[in-house]
């Protein structure tokens, strides 16, 4: 009787031990600040890591306010990946508050930066943080992420290097796709108006002109003069498409399109991915979505 | 003599407390009746019942086929917004409502009628004045002009001469006498007993319950007044349900 | 040359230079913005339509001491918009429709309660709108959406598209017709409700119809032109008219005129001085108000301050 019970108990324990993969292989906890970065990190890290993203999909990193839960996530992480270039103004304080021992890796290290007009202080120029919009830069990101992961988890070096190489190839293919799509757009139509100043790197890398409308600031009501200026600008410079994601009233956008004959563009994703099943659920999908919207608006 | 208003065991009041208690009787067609009584006697309440604003708690009022909305009524305290931008003329012209309705136009003949009414109350020259600029007496004259235009067979006046100067009272009393001459039925609540004795052939002394009703001289006796004053003014919070209200 | 384009002159005559310059300047300042830009024309038509429909209603609201109903309504329609959003997502039609229904329920409910109980209009309305607002916030929180529903629902004078224009013009037409229909009982209801009760049963219906007009103009105005403009154009001209007319027809005339004028000048100010358009229109009306308070023929302050010889009689 005793023997049978002991055997059953032992069998149960062995079964439990065998059935729990977590014990066999602990995933490295890693934090990325926002969804685009998170996707890149996931592609380099593969199964060895578990990525938590602070700023969720479809959310704005500029106005993100961290919660205590985020501090906890940081505290238990082995590595932290940030974009840098001033994108996450709140990060330094959060890292300190969490007391995490994890090293912070800046994905944009080594990139040649651009400047852009400050969102809040017109006329002042600041560093443009949206470096990932150029695929060449994204490749630098991937390299930096790989090196960071290797430093945090030397045991996984070979896996990280393999993942990174594979993903870099995908990025090469993506870059060819983007360049081909741009080439199909007639040269004189490669310009759009967009309120959000996120595409500077994209424009520089692939030869598209992104023009900021003079005057319309997204957080206040436009004046008639502002509207007139945009319409005149679009007419004069013969800008074929208008993408204005941030204006709350879509009718304003349509009014501009109607009066100028410009096309109203679809939804662009720049600072954040969409939800996982959506049109821009990964970095590669995001770039594809954007170039598709550009092509749609500019080639018809 | 036919009854214009027949009260059958009429009880009117608020919150189940009777302000007019078991009133029986008739107001004859073409009569000129003063309704008198101490404060709180139920005079205003009775008038509200007559014009249909208040529903009886018990009993009923028969009006000999007259629609309550065709009874001209001058309340004791008019809820008039004096700051409203309307002229004396337009205000008086509202008296034509029953004949004009929502859209009826005011033609030349009607204009003459309105102006005649304004003249009859001594307000000629005041036609375009905003009502907010009128004195108490002038306001009352204006309301009488409106009553004139209503051309009603039954007219009910609740203390029409309160706080009004003597000249105005006299002028308006003349109008009341004219109505009586035109065989309209007039009911008026009054405090000034001299006016009642001089102008009103019939009187109803009310002190929640009817004390006396008939010829003025018979009604306004000392005994009757003593009886009337004895009746309590305030509602009794602990009163039981009325046994006679079955 | 420009002058000749406008003034085809007989041979041999030329308009003097300074006169031509003035005409050009006037044209550039007053007409050109509307001639050159379609959105300006639409904004003007939308403002004029709103002026025609909402200003008369504002006069009655002011006289009935309901001047703050506009702001109350802007918040109170939230549960209606929220339910519309729950049913059909970010559909302007569903949300505006929901808002309209919520507005009706609140206005009519408050009106009925005020008529049949001791409660006055303002108290009744306050109760309804607070409850409605709380309900709206609760629905939105439970549903858990990030979008500022009301912000989405409210339009802007610079973004008047065809459906919006039709909406505003339609509302104005209906308002004018209904107002003409209920004119008499409405006036009487304001000045002597007791008398109206004694001669007619139309008072209640007229009151409800009036409230319906208020809700329609407000919610439609919010959706077409935004809250500031809708409420502002309804109430400010009405308040101004108090200082210029002594009878109600005159007041309505002044109110409509002021509203239209403010729309026109406000749009020009927004264009030339680069100011946001809705506020510019209201500020123009505000300036007229300030002038009226001091110099208005009916009760303007200046008449109290300046000594005047009294009349003979």
Image: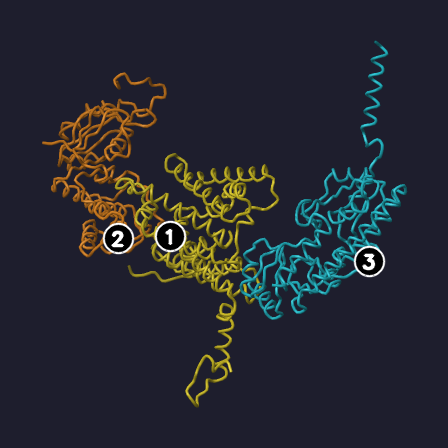
Chain colours: A cyan, B orange, C yellow
Checking the image for residue B89, the label placed there is 2
CA gap between label 1 and label 2 equals 30 Å
Output the chain of dot 2. Answer: B
Output the chain of dot 3. Answer: A
| Above-or-below relation of A255 to C189 | below
Task: Quickly name the residue at label 1.
Answer: C174
Q: Along the horizontal axis of the image, is A227 left or right of A116? A: left
Q: Along the horizontal axis of the image, is C221 left or right of B95? A: right
Output the chain of dot 1. Answer: C
Residue positioned 55% across, 58% down in the render: A252
Secondary structure found at label 2: helix
Residue positioned 85% across, 19% down in the render: A10
Q: Position of residue A151 (x, y in %)?
A: 89, 45
Q: Is residue A129 visible?
A: no
Comparing B50 with B176, the one in front is B50
| Above-or-below relation of C266 to C190 | below
Comparing A275 with B139, the one in front is A275
- Are labels 3 and 2 on one chain? no
CA gap between label 3 and label 2 equals 85 Å
């Amino acid at each position: 009787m005793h023997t049978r019970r002991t055997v059953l108990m032992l069998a149960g324990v062995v079964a439990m031990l065998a059935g729990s993969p977590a014990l066999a292989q602990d995933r490295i906890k890693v934090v990325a600040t926002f969804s685009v970065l998170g996707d890149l990190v996931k592609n380099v890290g593969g199964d060895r890591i578990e990525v938590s993203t602070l700023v969720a999909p479809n959310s704005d990193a500029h106005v993100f306010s961290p919660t205590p839960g985020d501090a906890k996530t940081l505290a238990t992480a082995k590595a932290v990946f940030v974009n840098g270039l001033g994108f996450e103004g709140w990060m330094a304080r959060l890292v300190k508050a969490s007391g995490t021992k994890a090293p912070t890796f800046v994905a944009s290290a080594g990139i040649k930066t651009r400047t852009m007009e400050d969102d809040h202080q017109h006329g002042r120029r600041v560093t443009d943080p949206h470096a990932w919009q150029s695929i060449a830069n994204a490749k630098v990101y991937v390299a930096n992420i790989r090196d960071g992961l290797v430093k945090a988890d030397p045991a996984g070096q070979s896996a990280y290097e393999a993942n990174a190489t594979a993903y870099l190839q995908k990025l090469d293919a993506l870059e060819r796709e983007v360049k081909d799509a741009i080439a199909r757009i007639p040269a004189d139509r490669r310009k759009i108006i967009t309120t959000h100043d996120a595409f500077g790197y994209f424009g520089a890398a692939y030869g598209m002109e992104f023009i900021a409308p003079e005057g319309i600031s997204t957080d206040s009501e436009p004046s008639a003069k502002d509207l007139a200026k945009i319409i005149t600008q679009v007419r004069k410079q013969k800008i074929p498409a208008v993408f204005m994601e941030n204006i709350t009233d879509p009718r304003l956008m349509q009014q501009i399109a109607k009066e100028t004959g410009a096309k109203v563009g679809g939804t662009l994703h720049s600072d954040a991915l969409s939800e996982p099943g959506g049109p821009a659920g990964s970095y590669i999908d995001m770039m594809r979505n954007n170039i598709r919207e550009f092509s749609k608006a500019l080639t018809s | 003599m036919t009854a214009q208003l027949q009260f059958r065991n009429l009880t009117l009041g608020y919150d189940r407390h009777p302000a007019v208690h078991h009133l029986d009787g008739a107001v004859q067609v073409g009569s000129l009746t003063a309704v008198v009584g101490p404060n709180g006697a139920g005079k205003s309440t009775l008038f509200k019942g007559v014009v249909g604003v208040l529903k009886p708690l018990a009993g009923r009022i028969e009006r000999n086929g007259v629609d309550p909305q065709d009874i001209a009524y001058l309340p004791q305290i008019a809820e008039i917004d004096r700051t409203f931008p309307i002229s004396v003329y337009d205000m008086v012209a509202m008296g034509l409502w029953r004949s004009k309705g929502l859209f009826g136009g005011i033609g030349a003949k009607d204009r003459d009628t309105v102006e005649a009414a304004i003249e009859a109350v001594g307000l000629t020259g005041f036609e375009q004045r905003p009502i907010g600029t009128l004195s108490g007496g002038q306001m009352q004259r204006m309301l009488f002009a409106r009553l004139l235009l209503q051309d009603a067979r039954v007219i009910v006046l609740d203390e029409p001469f309160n706080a009004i100067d003597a000249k105005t009272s006299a002028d308006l009393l003349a109008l009341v006498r004219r109505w009586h001459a035109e065989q309209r039925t007039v009911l008026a609540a009054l405090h000034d007993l001299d006016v009642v004795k001089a102008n009103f052939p019939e009187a109803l002394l009310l002190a929640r319950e009817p004390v006396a009703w008939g010829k003025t001289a018979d009604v306004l006796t000392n005994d009757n007044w003593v009886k009337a004053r004895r009746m309590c003014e305030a509602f009794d919070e602990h009163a039981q349900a009325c046994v006679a209200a079955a | 040359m420009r002058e000749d384009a406008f003034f085809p002159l007989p041979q041999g005559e030329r308009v003097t230079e300074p006169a031509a310059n003035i005409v050009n300047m006037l044209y550039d300042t007053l007409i050109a913005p509307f001639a050159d830009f379609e959105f300006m024309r639409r904004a003007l038509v939308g403002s004029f339509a709103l002026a025609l429909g909402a200003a008369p209603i504002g006069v009655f609201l002011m006289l009935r001491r309901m001047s703050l109903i506009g702001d109350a309504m802007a918040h109170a329609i939230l549960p209606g918009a929220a339910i519309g959003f729950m049913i059909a997502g970010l559909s302007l039609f569903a949300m505006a429709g929901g808002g309209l229904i919520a507005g009706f329920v609140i206005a009519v409910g408050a009106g009925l309660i005020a008529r049949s109980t001791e409660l006055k209009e303002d108290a009744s309305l306050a109760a309804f709108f607070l409850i409605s607002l709380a309900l709206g916030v609760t629905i939105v929180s439970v549903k858990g959406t990030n979008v500022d529903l009301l912000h989405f629902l409210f339009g802007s004078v610079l973004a008047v598209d065809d459906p919006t224009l039709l909406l505003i013009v339609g509302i104005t037409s209906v308002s004018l017709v209904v107002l003409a229909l209920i004119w008499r009982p409405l006036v009487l209801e304001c000045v002597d409700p007791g008398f109206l009760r004694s001669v007619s049963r139309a008072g209640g219906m007229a009151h409800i119809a009036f409230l319906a007009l208020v809700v329609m103009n407000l919610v439609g105005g919010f959706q077409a032109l935004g809250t500031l403009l809708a409420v502002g154009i309804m109430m400010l001209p009405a308040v101004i008219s108090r200082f210029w007319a002594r009878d109600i027809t005159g007041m309505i005339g002044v109110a409509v005129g002021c509203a239209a004028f403010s729309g026109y000048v406000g749009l020009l100010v927004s264009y030339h001085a680069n100011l946001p358009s809705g506020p510019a229109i209201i500020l123009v009306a505000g300036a007229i108000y300030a002038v009226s308070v001091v110099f208005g023929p009916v009760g303007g302050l200046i008449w109290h301050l300046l000594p005047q010889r009294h009349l003979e009689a």
